[in-house]
Image (cartoon, helix red, strand yellow):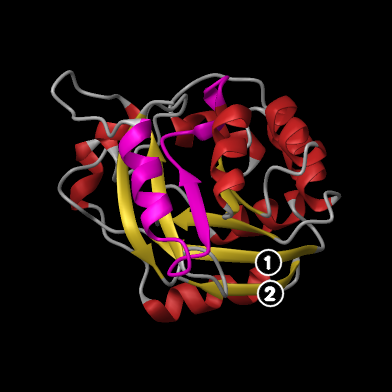
Amino acid sequence: MKIGGLQKLSLLDYPEHIAAIMFTQGCNFRCHFCYNPKLVVPQKDYSLISEDSLFEFLHSRQGKIDSVVITGGEPTLHSDLPEFITKIKNVGYLIKLDTNGTNPKMLEFLIQKKLIDYIAMDIKAPLKNYQKVVGIDFILANITKSIIIIKESGLPYEFRSTIMPSLHKKEDIEEMGKLIKDADKWYLQKFKPLKDLVDNKFSQEKAYTDKEMNALSEIGKKYAKICDIR
């Protein structure tokens, strides 16, 4: 597994659990607002963490953390993901997987093999605008397939969307909501205008205000049992 980073403690990323966050390298999307460009397109001098070092850490933290969040990049791009997760679960940890939903076959396999305990999937845009927002052409049907797989998995899950004014209008929230209708949880995340983005032209973009985000979440509540702001 290509490991691009490790956050040793998080109280926020896995609901009701104390987690470590492991970042895989490489992503098939080029979302303009992504704040992890070194994970999306790894640099030659970007240091990797060895699996041995990761598992040494996980063994040392038994009883202090109870879960591992696997995020990226896009974890499902890695063919060795099932084997890698199996090794982590054998140490005794729960697994939360973050995904962009482009690999429904891998997602379904992980669920069938009971290798994941919680799923978070990003919903980037209405289907008609998806390729514009993520910066590439891909098989759009994979998004809807993954949504169905997740909703029917029987596992706790959430959908989440980073929202920014130049890419997401009020009517877009309606269309995105329709994609995940009757979902358990949907979180709208305010865009952060950081300096180091995949597309640095967006570093000067303004974010929605808290008031505007709350208004958008009211739209989301028509489509998800819980729709909150992060």
User: Left of 139 or right of it: where is 208?
Assistant: left
Q: Which stretch is magenta?
A: 51-80
From the viewer's side, name the closer residue of 41 and 17. 17
From the viewer's side, name the closer residue of 112 and 203. 112
Q: Are marks 1 and 2 in contact (CB under 8 Å)?
A: yes
Mark 1, Cα crowd under 10 Å, few <14 / some 14-19 / many 20+, is many
The residue positioned 69% from the left and 42% from the top of the image is 115
> Mark 2 — residue?
226
Residue 134: x and y in percent read 46, 33
- Would you place residue 221 above or below residue 88 in this image? below
Distance Cα–Cα, label 1 vs label 2:
5 Å
The residue positioned 36% from the left and 41% from the top of the image is 54
> Mark 1 — residue?
185
Residue 62: x and y in percent read 46, 61
Residue 63 part of the magenta segment: yes
- Would you place residue 212 above or below residue 97 in this image? below
Residue type at numbered disc 2: Ile
Residue 58: x and y in percent read 41, 51
The residue positioned 57% from the left and 75% from the top of the image is 16
